């Protein structure tokens, strides 16, 4: 059973956009608006990726008012594997949007 779970996990994270999303949120929680700006993609497109990552319990969502902030699920059994993979990707500067700045000020 473990091999099947690992295979499904790797298929889920093995999409370039999802890897970049995961790399971005590995530095701390981000809102969808941060990710849409960072990836230059529409909110619905990012939301589809987030839904898939959430379904596999790779990410967690934290509702703050009308915004949802996403973070890595550090309790996932394959979290260490994910961190090792993400270390291979280059870091990028994330321009945080208004909703993130507002919540960081609290």
Image (cartoon, helix red, strand yellow):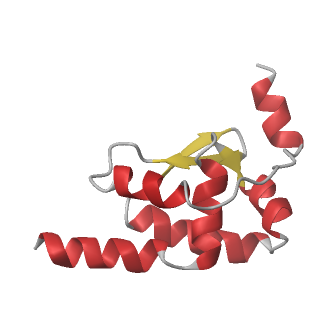
Residue toward you, 32 or 96: 96
From the viewer's perspective, is 45 left or right of 53? right
Q: Position of residue 104 (x, y in %)?
A: 76, 27
The number of discs equals: 0
Q: Nearer the viewer, residue 86 or 8?
A: 86
* Residue displayed at 82% across by 41% down: 99
Residue at 36% from the left image edge and 57% from the top image edge = 81
Residue 58 can be seen in this image: no
Q: Residue furthest left?
A: 1
Question: Relative to residue 42, is residue 96 depicted above or below?
Answer: above
Residue 8, compared with residue 66, is above or below; it is below
Q: Position of residue 95 (x, y in %)?
A: 87, 48
Residue at the top extreme of this rendering: 106
Residue drawn at x 57%, y 58% is 22
In the rendered image, which quarter is residue 106 located in? Answer: top right
Percent position of residue 61, x then y: 53, 48
Compared across the picture, whether 87 is left or right of 36 comes to left
Note whether 102 is above or below 28 in the view shown: above
Classify the position of the N terminus by image quarter.
bottom left
- Left or right relative to 33: residue 11: left
Tell which of 96 and 93 is nearer to you. Answer: 93
x, y percentage for residue 83? 46, 51
In this rendering, does residue 68 appear at all? yes
At a point 17% along the width and 75% down the height, the residue shown is: 3
Q: Depth check: 23 or 42 in front? A: 23
- On screen, residue 100 versus residue 22, left or right, reads right
């Amino acid at each position: 059973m473990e091999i099947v779970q690992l295979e499904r996990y790797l298929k889920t994270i093995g999409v370039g956009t999802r890897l970049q999303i995961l790399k971005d949120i590995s530095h701390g929680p981000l809102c969808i608006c941060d990710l849409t700006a960072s990836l230059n993609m529409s909110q619905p497109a990012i939301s589809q990726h987030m839904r898939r990552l959430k379904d596999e319990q790779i990410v967690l969502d934290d509702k703050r008012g009308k915004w949802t902030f996403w973070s890595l699920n550090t309790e996932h059994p394959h979290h260490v594997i994910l961190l090792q993979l993400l270390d291979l990707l280059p870091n990028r500067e994330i321009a945080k949007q208004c909703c993130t700045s507002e919540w960081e000020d609290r």
